Every structure is written in structure tokens, then in C-alpha cells.
Amino acid sequence: MKGFFWYPLLAVIVSLPAIFAFFFSKSLYPIANISNNISLFFHFSFLGFFIIRAIPDRKNDYLFKIIFVIFFALIALLLVTGNIKKINGPAFATANLGLTIFCIIYYYRLFNDLPILNLRTEPSFWIITGIFFCMTLHIPMYATFNYLNNKVTSPSYIVLKSVAAFCFAIMHLFFIKAYLCSVRPHKR
């Protein structure tokens, strides 16, 4: 948990231009989209490394590094070839797919043997569960983001964006649960 506060803090900072654009000036959307696209590198790297460090019995560390580098390169390629002033749905879907794969590996390694941890009080379990919930639901939304942006009506599009925001809110609730697990004394 040490140092994990950087992820939610940066999420708030990156979200501010989008919030201002939504409520005050639509002209801020390109700036919000640029900061959101660039923050994707931090999003994937920070959460990816967190999950990798939490994976029990990391026998094949080189495999995790290869997976990480492949997804990082794909994200970079998708961002470079796309319009930086618009949300790059395929890049976000790729990042979320990579994080989902890391979460699945974590769960497989954790539950392959009987857990020696009390998962109800294990902060990393709650964080990874929040990441898994949010990223898994976001993959289809971001994969079809560019298509839906041009095909659905504005009210429907706002509902879809609200679902994405709801998923992030749930993920951060899991982060709060993890924080509470880390500050409460564990009863055995």
C-alpha cells in the first residue's frame, strides 16, 4: 500500500480538465483528451507493476516483463497512430486488456494453492479485485468507443460514459476498502 496514493491522486488531477470541459467550456475537451491519453502510460505502468509485485510465487518473472513490454508497445503504437486530441478507445481497451490478464494471472496463482492469506484483510487483493472489475467492464466500451461516438445519440453516449465513470467509482471504493484493511489492526 505504500505509495499507492499516487494513482488516485493522479486520476483526480487528470480528470479535472474533463470536469471543467463538461461543466464550463467544451473548448477544453482537446486538452482533457490529450492529458487522458498521455496518462494511459502511467495508468498501465503503475497498476501493472502493482499487480505483478502482488502475484504470489513469481517463478517466471521474465514472462511478466515480456507481457508488460508487449502491451506497453501496443499502447504506444495506438496512441502515436491515433489522434491525440481525441480519446483513443483502442489504446485504452488494450491497456485494460493487459491489466485484466495480469489480474487473471494473480487470481490463478493465488487460488491455485490454498491461500495462506486472509483475503478479507489483504489490501492487495481488494485493489486487484477493483482493477479487475473496472478494467474488464471497460474493455468492450473502449473497444467500441470510436464507433459508438459516431453512431449513437448524444443522450445514449452520455449514459455509456456514465457507466464508465460508475466502474471507476466502484474501483475506487475497492481501493478505500484496501486502505481500511491496511490501517486496521488484523485480528487472528
Image (tube, rainbow, N blue to C red):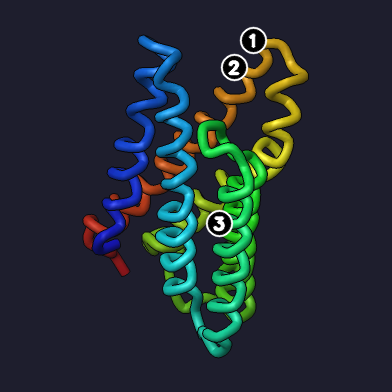
Q: Nearer the viewer, residue 173 or 188?
A: 173
Residue assigned mark 3: 76
Circle 3 — which element? helix
In the depicted structure, whether residue 161 falls above or below residue 174: above
Write down the residue under mark 1. 155
Q: Position of residue 47 (x, y in %)?
A: 45, 59
Would you identify the image quadrant in which residue 159 lies?
Answer: top right
For the C terminus, the quadrant is bottom left
Q: Give the CA distance from mark 1 to mark 2.
A: 5 Å
| Residue 25 horizontal/vertical position (percent) | 39, 11
Proximity of marks 1 and 2: CB atoms separated by less than 8 Å? yes
Q: What is the CA distance from the residue labelled 2 to the residue labelled 3?
A: 27 Å
Rendered position, 17 above or below 51 = above
Q: Residues within 10 Å of mark 3 (few under 14, many from 20)?
A: some
Question: Which of the 4 image quadrants contains residue 75?
Answer: bottom right
Who is closer to the viewer here, 117 or 32?
32
Residue 158: assigned label: 2
Q: Quadrant of the N terminus?
A: bottom left
Residue 136 seen anywhere in this rendered image of the structure: no
Residues marked 1 and 3 touching at CB (< 8 Å): no
Tell me the kind of residue under disc 2.
Ile
Q: CA distance from mark 1 to mark 3?
A: 31 Å
For discs 1 and 3, the disc positioned in front in the rendered view: 3
